[in-house]
């Protein structure tokens, strides 16, 4: 079976666009293709950080939250510490609607002949406006304020996470 080069090129371009729809785990970027998606962080002091992950309209809330937690774990390990506690969790879902108006306007005039004068006169004027379409996109951003600690993670705190364990267990599920 012979496949034409153009068929392979079309398939390759299609796969590129499909793969670019999913938000990848990467530092925040502002490219034309990906929008402003990815992670960013700000150290507030030596053990307190603010970590943000922004997804696009194809990224589920679960993925955005997992990627933010994964970044928290990475920072903790990079700082040489063992676990972190989420102090504050801020989820923001944004919905953006864009209305596009078709500015085309069409006017139609119907005429008839006046039987008394023989002149053509307008009898009806119909004007139709263009249509409008609304496009809605949603995005989801999570910001977590965390504090980093050394030692054993306390079992009685549901907001405490073992960073090394998380990095090891979550790494295979992270889309880079």
Image (cartoon, rainbow, N blue to C red):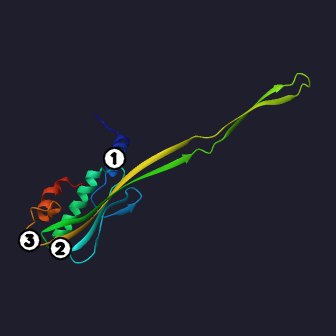
Q: Label for residue 134?
A: none
The residue carrying pointer 3 sits among few (fewer than 14), some (14 to 19) or many (20 or more) residues within 10 Å by Cα, namely few
Q: In this figure, which residue is indicated by the disc labeled 2?
A: 79
Q: Residue at x 31, y 54 (%)?
A: 23
Q: Which sits earlier in the primary sequence, circle 2 or circle 1?
A: 1
Residue 176 appears in the figure: no
Q: CA distance from mark 3 to mark 1?
A: 43 Å
Q: Label for residue 18?
A: 1
Residue 5 as seen in the image, left or right of residue 83: right
Q: Is residue 101 above or below residue 154?
A: above
Residue 30 image position (x, y, % from top left) = 39, 62
Q: Quadrant of the C terminus?
A: bottom left
- Label 1: which secondary element: helix
Residue 157 image position (x, y, % from top left) = 14, 62
Q: CA distance from mark 3 to mark 2?
A: 13 Å
Rendering quarter of residue 174 = bottom left
Q: Nearer the viewer, residue 61 or 70?
A: 61
Nearer the viewer's eye, disc 3 or disc 1?
3
Q: In this figure, which residue is indicated by the disc labeled 3?
A: 151
* Residues under numbered marks 2 and 1 in contact, where contact means CB atoms less than 8 Å apart: no
Q: Which sits earlier in the primary sequence, circle 3 or circle 2?
A: 2
Residue 135 image position (x, y, % from top left) = 47, 46
Q: Which sits earlier in the primary sequence, circle 3 or circle 1?
A: 1
In the image, farthest residue toward the front: 156
Residue 126 as seen in the image, left or right of residue 24: right
- Label 3: which secondary element: loop
Residue 68 image position (x, y, % from top left) = 25, 60
Nearer the viewer's eye, disc 3 or disc 2?
3
């Amino acid at each position: 079976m012979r496949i034409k080069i153009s068929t392979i090129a079309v398939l390759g371009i299609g796969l590129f666009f499909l793969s670019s729809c999913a938000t990848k785990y990467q530092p925040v970027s502002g490219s034309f293709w990906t929008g402003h998606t990815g992670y960013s962080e700000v150290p507030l002091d030596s053990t307190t950080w603010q970590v943000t992950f922004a997804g696009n309209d194809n990224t589920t809330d679960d993925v955005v939250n997992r990627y933010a937690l994964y970044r928290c774990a990475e920072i903790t390990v990079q700082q040489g510490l063992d676990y972190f506690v989420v102090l504050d969790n801020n989820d923001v879902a944004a919905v953006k609607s864009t209305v596009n108006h078709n500015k085309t306007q069409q006017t139609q005039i119907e005429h008839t002949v006046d039987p008394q004068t023989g002149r053509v006169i307008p009898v009806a004027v119909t004007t139709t406006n263009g249509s409008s379409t609304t496009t809605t996109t949603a995005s989801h951003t999570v910001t977590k304020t965390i504090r980093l600690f050394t030692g054993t993670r306390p079992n009685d705190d549901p907001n405490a996470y073992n960073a090394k364990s998380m990095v090891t267990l979550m790494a295979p599920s992270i889309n880079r």
